[in-house]
């Protein structure tokens, strides 16, 4: 819900489709000048209509480096909600790399449900 609320508040529901625009908006909303949830480093469009999101300095993993599995359910939910709202498509997600497990960045696979 948080991701959807952010996009709705900006008046951008269903209006953003490109990876570059999504990256720009998320970096501003969630980064140093926004909520400070994380630093969005890269958003890459996938062939299936989804996106791969790369972040560093996520709040969910602050001080965690030895988690046994991906650790960032809240952050992933923000990406699922915001990208769903930006694109107007229902999305699901999975974290495939996590700094809480010692990776250099967290990586999320955000994919369409339909």
Image (tube, helix red, strand yellow):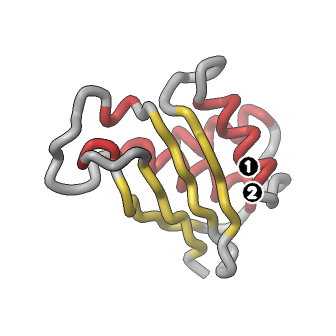
67 or 79: nearer the eye?
67
- Which residue is the site of mark 1? 22
- Which residue is the site of mark 2? 19
Helix, strand or loop for disc 1: helix
Relative placement, left or right, of 93 versus 28 is left
**3D distance between C-alphas at marks 1 and 2:** 5 Å
6 or 25: nearer the eye?
25
Image x and y of residue 74, in percent: 38, 43
Give me the residue at 33% from left, 44% from top.
99
Q: Which residue lies furthest to the top in this view?
A: 33
Helix, strand or loop for disc 2: helix
Reply above or below: 88 against 2: below
Residues at marks 1 and 2 touching, judged by CB atoms closer than 8 Å? yes
| Total labels drawn | 2
Q: Residue 61 shows which numbered tag?
A: none
Quadrant assignment, res 10: top right
Give me the residue at 45% from left, 50% from top.
77
Quadrant assignment, res 113: bottom right
């Amino acid at each position: 819900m948080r991701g959807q609320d952010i996009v709705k508040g900006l008046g951008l529901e269903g209006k953003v489709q490109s990876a570059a625009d999504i990256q720009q908006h998320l970096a501003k909303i969630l980064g140093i000048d926004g909520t400070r949830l994380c630093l969005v480093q890269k958003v890459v469009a996938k062939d299936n209509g989804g996106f791969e999101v790369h972040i560093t300095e996520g709040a969910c993993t602050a001080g965690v480096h030895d988690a046994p599995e991906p650790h960032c359910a809240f952050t992933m939910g923000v990406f699922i909600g915001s990208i769903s709202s930006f694109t107007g498509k229902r999305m699901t997600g999975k974290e495939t790399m996590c700094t809480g497990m010692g990776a250099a960045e967290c990586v999320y696979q955000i994919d369409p449900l339909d």
